Amino acid sequence: MQVYRDADADPALIRGRKVAVIGYGNQGRAQALNLRDSGVEVTVALPPASESRGRAGDDGFDVMTAAQAAERADLAMMLAADEDQGRIYAEEVAPHLRAGAALGFSHGLAIRFGLIAPRADLDVFLVAPKGPGTALRSEYEAGRGLIALFAVHQDASGGAEALALSYAAAIGSGRAGILATSFAEECEADLFNEQAVLWGAIPELIHAGFETLVEAGFAPEIAYFECLTEVKLLADLIYERGIAGMREAISNTAEFGALAGGRRIVTDETRAEMRRILGEVRSGAFTARLIADAGAGYPRLRASRDEAAAHPVEAVRQRLLGLGGGT
Ligand SMILES: NC(=O)c1ccc[n+]([C@@H]2O[C@H](COP(=O)([O-])OP(=O)(O)OC[C@H]3O[C@@H](n4cnc5c(N)ncnc54)[C@H](OP(=O)(O)O)[C@@H]3O)[C@@H](O)[C@H]2O)c1
């Protein structure tokens, strides 16, 4: 896989463009601040009634609607929620963005699943930082960067790749590495991972382990430390040393336990289910469910948030925070 760095990017390309950052949430704020600190002219776009307008204004940005920002921009960076991007593009961006401008994304979903069919005259690229906006910003401020994936969907000008690399470098990712991918690969791998590994499977495993210990009569605080707090130690070890290196850093007892337990939990059936999840991602069935939930006011998302908040593990967390520990 080809990895690009600052030396491969021309910073003048993005500095010569007016960038409209559409959305000022997790990614929008971080990217807007990093771009500005890299010498790029940035306007922030938010709905008229958005509560984030105050924050963007306090950060020193001109804030306007997406339609107004698109009209003034050479590049519209789509950093609203994925499920809103189709509507925002159709109603506010496409009618106003000048001919020959560029359209950028930090996730491939809207293009991969056809929520947006970009105008043929636009350059269309992806720069997807591999981490949350808070980390993108703090790494940039520390003189480092987050790895980003990049791809070109449409190269109307012949300069889309160079512009994407310039953008990625301006948000700090050239300091760490900019990896070439496609919209489909980035989107499908990301949606799969969110469900099958990261945000879906790991919290469910924590809940299940906690419940098993508490049902068997263990103190909830002990169950919490064992099943939740130590996940951070594990993640840090894997991040620093890899999985094989992590095993060297734990006791023989823990390592032998890993042999005994891991493959009884993650079984052939688990792997088969992972393949089914990947199938639903690739067929668009998952995205269709997401769009339907958003259209109905997020009943499923809201119910799952309520369910997570009501889980006994959260009450234990509050008690431990009260004792000054157990984060
Ligand atoms: N979160 C991450 O760590 C992460 C990482 C990599 C890539 N991404 C990608 O980055 C993109 C943005 O995700 P996010 O998590 O940053 O989203 P987010 O935190 O939910 O922020 C979305 C922003 O869009 C604004 N918005 C809504 N309607 C708008 C409109 N009509 N015009 C302009 N702005 C509008 C929202 O306004 P309000 O503030 O009023 O709600 C909010 O500021 C997505 O494509 C996502 O997949 C996210």
Image (tube, rainbow, N blue to C red):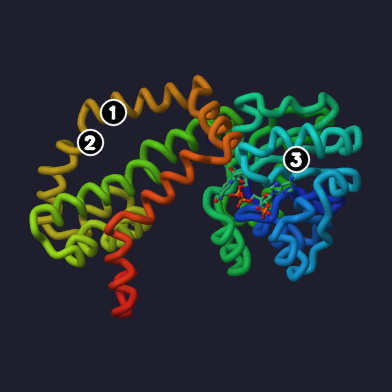
Q: Secondary structure at mark 2?
A: loop
Q: Residues within 10 Å of mark 3 (few under 14, many from 20)?
A: some
Tell me residue 294's x, y (percent): 58, 37
Which quadrant is the C terminus positioned in?
bottom left
> Does mark 3 have its CB less than 8 Å from ligand 1?
no
N-terminal-most mark, 2 or 1: 2
N-terminal-most mark, 2 or 3: 3
Q: Residues within 10 Å of mark 2 (few under 14, many from 20)?
A: few
- Residue wearing tag 3: 162
- Residue at 37% over, 51% down: 308
- The image shows residue 287, relative to residue 255, as above or below, that is above
- The image shows residue 268, relative to residue 4, as above or below, that is above
The amino acid at mark 2 is Val
User: In front here: 109 or 305?
Assistant: 305
What is the total number of numbered labels drawn onto the structure image? 3
Residue 128 picture quarter: top right
The amino acid at mark 3 is Ala
- Residue wearing tag 1: 271
Q: Indicate left or right for 286 with 250 as reference.
A: right
- Residue at 23% over, 57% down: 227
Closer to us: mark 3 or mark 1? 1
- Residue at 14% over, 43% down: 261
User: In front here: 80 or 270?
Assistant: 80
- Residue at 41% over, 51% down: 306
The amino acid at mark 1 is Arg
N-terminal-most mark, 3 or 1: 3
Q: Are the residues tagged 2 and 3 within 8 Å (C-beta)?
A: no
> Does mark 2 have its CB less than 8 Å from ligand 1?
no
| Mark 3 and mark 1: Cα distance apart in space | 39 Å
Closer to us: mark 2 or mark 3? 2
The circle on residue 266 is: 2
